[in-house]
Image: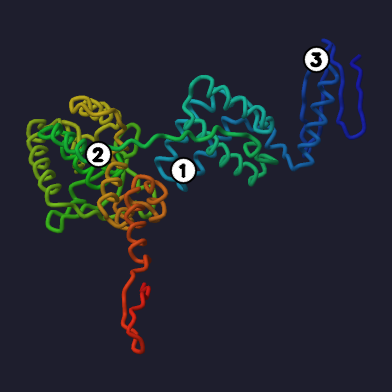
Amino acid sequence: MARKIRGKNEGSIHQRENGTWRAQICLEGQRLSFTARTRRECQDWIKKTIGQIDQGMTFDSTTVGMAEFLDHWLVSVKTSIRQTTWSHYHQLTRNYVLPQLGQIKLKDLNPNLIQRFYNQMLANEVGTYTVIKIHTMLHGALEQAVKSGLANRNVIKATIPPSEPIKEMKILDESQVSLLLVTARGSRMEALIHLAVSTGMRQMEILGLKWSDLDWIKRTLKVERQLVRGNGVQFAQPKTRSGRRTVTLGGQTIEVLRRHYESQNEERKKAGEAWNEHGLIFTSSVGTPIHFRNLTRDFKNLLKAAGLPGIRFHDLRHTAASLMLNHGIPVIVVSRRLGHAQPSITLNTYGHLIPGMQEEAAQLIDELITPIPIQQLHPTAPDLHPILAT
């Protein structure tokens, strides 16, 4: 007959006929069970479980696995976060989190388990930014689990995510920009590159532009949306409220866009019924949005043809900011063109690119405060006395 051992406040433990040990605890009228090879393991489980109960663990939380929890969490936050963010979270969950943590019960998560998960991803050469994003997502998800009573604490707070790597900002100078535009002249990339350099718009903002956003007479372009990465045609609002903005264009940019408009009309006629109309300024040869991977490939080929160093498409945004700031465009104007929430963001990001302004400021201050010797005739004496005037 199986032998039962019951200790004070430790639930019950009994040995089964096959020699294994089984521990049980009653929670909210339901029975929690645990089977192990040794009695000590059962005692440890009971001790841990009682501690979790004392911290607020409910019976429901003991049955919920990470896969089920994250699935419901993604549904609940879909209308409260940006579509691009949700799509990214969904992808991270499917590709990274569920294969490693999907079968684990929510109650069994602990900092060491999550830390090993991070370390394993880094060892498998998963990008640092990806691991940081997963950390952010899990922190938000577990915070909601605590609020809803499914977890007694957010174990993510006790983990250490990798530090964000410092990316070197690469920019093109004026002569390199000219060479890039000359090389792009007459190609399908010409207007897109011209607009990127002259406005500093983000890549997905440019790919989300529609002809209805362009005012030919006022020479303005409204940034109302951005293309969402993924399958199908999806758009989302810009990253921030200040991202929705109106950018004034120069006459040369308008002319480049006019030529692009005419070229697109020719492509539309050539494609015939195969054309997919979305009203976009920049499209594939059949009217569909340009996939960001195709844009990256074409941009790299363009740089190679121009004999220019390899940079990211996003570096054209940095290039635009540098050109504007180094030619005396006020920071607040640059900030608005870039869609930054505050001019301080512009300065924090690009202040190091404008050392010339420091030299001009130093010289100007010197000229303002340096004493100038003059001579004035004293009314009671024939001698001339030097007087310092500021």
For this view, does 257 lie left or right of residue 95?
left
Disc 1 residue crowd, few under 14, some 14–19, many 20+, Cα 10 Å: some
Nearer the observer, 113 or 287? 113
Q: Position of residue 92 (x, y in %)?
A: 48, 31
Nearer the observer, 28 or 355? 355
Location of residue 152 by image quarter: top right
Q: Which mark is residue 37?
A: 3
Q: Which mark is residue 173?
A: 2
- Figure quadrant of the C terminus: bottom left
Residue placed furthest toward the top: 18
Say if 251 sits above or below 190 in the image: below
Please tell me whether mark 2 sits on a helix, a strand or a loop: loop
| Amino acid, disc 2 | Asp
Nearer the observer, 277 or 326? 326
User: What residue lies at 69% left-to-right and 30% top-to-bottom?
Assistant: 108
- Figure quadrant of the N terminus: top right
Mark 3–mark 2 Cα distance, whole angstroms, equals 69 Å
Location of residue 73 by image quarter: top right
